[in-house]
Image: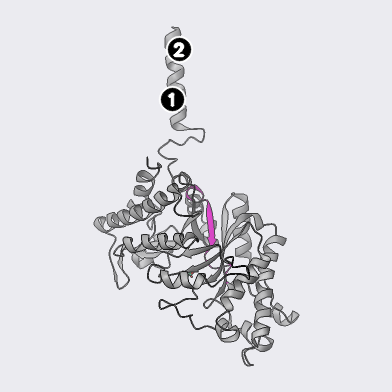
Amino acid sequence: MFCKRITVLFALLFSLTLVGCSGKTVEESKTLKSTFANHNLKAGTCVSGAMISDEEQRQVLLDNFSSITMENVMKPEAILDKNKSIETGEIAVEFNDEALSILEFAKENNLSMRGHTLVWYSQTPSWIFYEDFDESKNLVTRDEMLERMETFIRKTFGLIDELGYTDLFYAYDVVNEAVMEDGRMRDCLWKDTIGDDYVWYAFYYANKYAPESIDLYYNDYNEQLKTSALIRFAETLVDENGNYLVDGIGLQAHLYTQDSLITYFKTFDKLSAAGFKVEITELDVGLGSWNNPLEPTEENLKKQGDFYCALLKEVFKRVDEGTLNMDAVTFWGFMDTASWRSEYHPLLFDDTLSPKIAYDRIVNDLYDVAE
Ligand code: GLA
């Protein structure tokens, strides 16, 4: 009798362990964020207001991700306020309702945030570069533009703090996409007004106004094709004592299943050897190649699973061994239809929000730390 009771008790305890307090089975609790957490990494995604107001998408997001990046609403064109700048005579920064609701959503749900982005050639209004914020007038002088840049950066970090959200942020993309594959600086109005050292100033001001707790990133694409140029460039971003003004290099990782992973791993190793933190900031792996998108057949989706798995396996291995200093891997969304590259079916959930082969491969093959 006693034995029988003990057996029943053990059976009960065993099934409670399997089912867990949340009512989920152990198998179900293998999500992206628990898999990444096993390797001390945050799992991130970009978000829009539409994603968090749709109940199903919100649930997928909360189940799978521990970090978010705003897809658009913290970009310069969304936060620089023209009327207020004209009215006050200096650069004005405001967050719109969508940005505010995402910040609040992050706070309520304990999600960390990557800030994206301050100084960029794209999605940046041209009026900020002209006298009196009027594009029919002349471009402002270098000194005036430096003052505007400083005001922009000071007010952005100031507003985040004033609203009580500073603690959510662990990383910020201070400058996006300034370097070309051949190492030259990309032409843009920041460069035209300030000169080639505009990136140095952006990091100088960000260091001045961002709290220590936020890592400052230079973020770029085609990183595997311009790794040496990126390193040479980032090494010029130092203060008067020779300390890096940049904490890390953000790798956008807009990849294709036909890309070379060997080349990609070399990028990790070269950046790590140069002493930089690295983050994957906008990961998506399109089917095929840039000029040859493939259909989402079983075979192609399996290849995508292999690619994601091989990439993340090497990331996890390096992070686990301590040879890659990385806090997070951020995907550029999670549902194929909502992707900016939807024709390549690059994300982990299909159009009906069902996990794809790549998702299953990641959580099943990479959940455990390798022996
Ligand atoms: C770049 C930017 C992102 C986003 C994508 C396209 O990678 O850094 O913010 O605009 O392009 O969606």
Q: Nearer the viewer, residue 280 or 100?
A: 280
Determine the residue positioned at 63% across, 82% down: 128
Q: Amino acid at mark 2?
A: Arg
Q: Is residue 258 above or below residue 136?
A: above
Residue at disc 2, secondary structure: helix
Q: Nearer the viewer, residue 295 or 250?
A: 250
Task: Give x and y (percent) for residue 162.
Answer: 72, 61
Instruction: State the mark number for residue 5.
Output: 2
The magenta-colored residue range is: 62-75
Instruction: Please identify the quarter of the rendering in which residue 303 is found.
Output: bottom left
Determine the residue positioned at 45% across, 63% down: 271
The residue singled out by tag 1 in the image is: 14
* Residue 114 visible somewhere in the drawing: yes
Label 1 packing within 10 angstroms: few (<14), some (14-19), many (20+): few
Q: Is residue 86 left or right of residue 250?
A: right
| Separation of marks 1 and 2 at Cα, in angstroms | 14 Å
